[in-house]
Image (cartoon, rainbow, N blue to C red):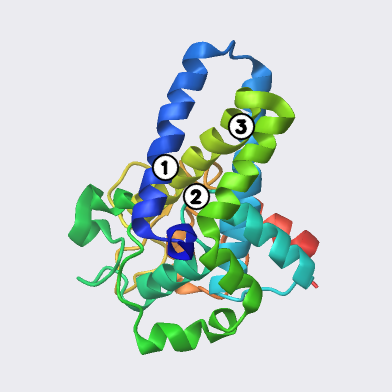
């Protein structure tokens, strides 16, 4: 029974489909106001920026900064609410991406997989090298708990919002922002390895196809400075130039210790 709650590829896909259906229904049945889009943006900021980018990516995967442990746990939960996998699952797949960037075994390289990267595939083999690199998480009881009870945590959070503000709050403060977070993560994975895409350019000529993209930099909270990131993966601020704004990097400057 407990295995049903654990983070999984199929579960993430079902959850995102659930988010898509309810978001469409929400836009159809409710009066959409500026407040509605404000809730979606707030949710996207919490789950996408603070959760996935600031914590899952730059703290847990690349350990590019230190901050208070309680803040890491809080932001990890926000990342979990995005519905794209637990911290353990997310970090494992991203480490694999860097180890095998734009090679046949890269879990989300558009060079080999095209649009199939949008399948939210976390089912790739986690080899011993990956396990070694994320050993600080695999042995952590908090991250083990989030992984083991992942979908129970998602359901509990959604139901809590439902009891507070009904279906409207559940959709527009959780399901719709989670959908946006998942879509934007995959846009970065795709556009960030398409040097010829509109808005893309390469500052560093690396062995992979990583590219910066000015068009998606702000909507992705700075993640679209992807070529810079692949050149300096341990750096917490992705912008190279003063005009390469990295919102997540600025937040990290505020919370790092």
Whether residue 6 is visible to the viewer of this picture, yes or no, is yes
Circle 1 SS class: helix
- For disc 1, the marked residue is 16
Q: Quadrant of residue 42?
A: top right
Circle 2 SS class: loop
Q: Position of residue 148 (x, y in %)?
A: 52, 67
Residue at the spot x=63%, y=38% of the render? 159
* Dot label at residue 83: 2
Quadrant location of the N terminus? Answer: bottom left
Disc 3 or 2, which lies upstream in sequence? Answer: 2
Distance from disc 1 to disc 3, alpha carbons, whole Å, reads 14 Å
Q: Position of residue 12 (x, y in %)?
A: 41, 51
Residue at the spot x=37%, y=89% of the render? 128
Q: Is residue 245 left or right of residue 191?
A: right
Mark 2 nearby-residue class (10 Å; few <14, some 14–19, many ≥20)? many
Residue 118 or residue 109, whichever sits in front: 118
- For disc 3, the marked residue is 170
Residue 250 or residue 182, whichever sits in front: 182
């Amino acid at each position: 029974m407990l295995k049903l709650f654990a983070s999984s590829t199929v579960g993430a896909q079902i959850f995102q489909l659930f988010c898509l259906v309810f978001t469409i229904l929400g836009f159809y049945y409710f009066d959409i106001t500026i407040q509605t889009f404000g809730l979606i943006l707030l949710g996207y900021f919490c789950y996408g920026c603070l959760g996935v980018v600031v914590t899952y990516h730059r703290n847990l995967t690349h350990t590019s900064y230190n901050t208070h442990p309680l803040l890491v746990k809080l932001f990890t939960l926000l990342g979990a609410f995005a519905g794209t996998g637990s911290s353990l699952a997310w970090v494992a797949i991203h480490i694999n991406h860097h180890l095998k960037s734009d090679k046949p075994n890269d879990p989300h390289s558009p060079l080999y997989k095209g649009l199939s990267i949008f399948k939210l595939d976390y089912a790739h083999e986690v080899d011993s090298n990956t396990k070694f690199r994320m050993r600080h998480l695999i042995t952590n009881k908090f991250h083990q708990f989030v992984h083991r009870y992942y979908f129970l945590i998602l359901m509990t959070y959604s139901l809590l919002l439902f009891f507070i503000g009904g279906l409207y709050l559940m959709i527009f403060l959780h399901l719709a922002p989670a959908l946006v977070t998942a879509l934007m993560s995959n846009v970065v994975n795709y556009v960030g390895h398409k040097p010829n895409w509109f808005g893309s350019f390469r500052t560093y000529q690396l062995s992979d196809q990583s590219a910066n993209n000015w068009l998606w930099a702000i909507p992705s909270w700075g993640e679209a400075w992807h070529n810079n990131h692949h050149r300096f993966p341990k750096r917490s601020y992705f912008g190279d130039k003063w005009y390469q704004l990295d919102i997540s990097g600025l937040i990290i400057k505020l919370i790092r210790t």
